Image (cartoon, rainbow, N blue to C red):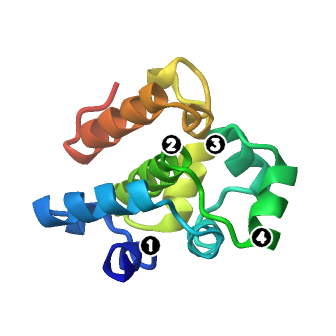
Amino acid sequence: MGQALKIGADLSYKLIDDRDVFMLISTVREGIKYALFQSIADKSPFSTAEWSGYLHLSERTFQRYKKEKRKFDPLHSEKILEITLVYNKGVEVFGDQANFDAWLEAKNVALGGIKPKELLDNTFGIGLLKDELTRIEHGVLA
């Protein structure tokens, strides 16, 4: 259990290999502790309200998790890790956090004219962002 939770501190898309995928699976199955989520959230540009929307949990539920030091269920844990991985990939592609944060906030023609961060609430949207980041990384712009 302890080994699986180490990933949260420095979860880097680029550094994950096949062994780490099993660590991710284990972490999802065990559930992410609120303290680990808080450390991830503190490094992201997303507010509690945005995380609440991405995870389809009320802000009140977040407060309860924090107070009770609860773990997120596997579905929410998986979504937290997916968002973290796509965020870290974006920072890698854009070269720094500020550039990627600006991209997340800007309406994007290639993504149907919406802000990329608005796609983080479901797996299909996260997949679109991953695909778009891969295109940007390889110089294929829409």
* Of residues 85 and 134, the one drawn nearer to the viewer in this rendering: 85
Name which of mark 3 and mark 1 comes first in the sequence.
1
Residue to which mark 1 is pinned: 8
Give the label on residue 119, or none.
none
Q: Earlier in the sequence, mark 4 or mark 2?
A: 4
Q: Earlier in the sequence, mark 4 or mark 3?
A: 3
Residue 36 visible in image: yes
Q: Amino acid at mark 2?
A: Leu
Q: Are marks 1 and 2 in contact (CB under 8 Å)?
A: no
- Find numbered disc 1 in the image and state the secondary structure of the residue it sits on: helix
Residue 9: percent from left, percent from top: 45, 79
Q: CA distance from mark 4 to mark 3?
A: 18 Å
Residue 7, quarter of the rendered image:
bottom left
Question: Residue 8's x, y, as percent?
Answer: 44, 72
Q: Position of residue 58 (x, y in %)?
A: 81, 44
How much space separates mark 2 and mark 3, taking CA atoms?
Answer: 9 Å
Residue for badge 2:
75
How many angstroms separate mark 1 from mark 4 (CA)? 20 Å
Q: Quadrant of the N terminus?
A: bottom left
Q: Earlier in the sequence, mark 1 or mark 2?
A: 1
Within 10 angstroms of label 3, few (less than 14), some, or many (20 or more) residues? some
**Residue under the point 27% across and 65% down:** 23
Spatial separation of the CA atoms under disc 3 and disc 1: 17 Å
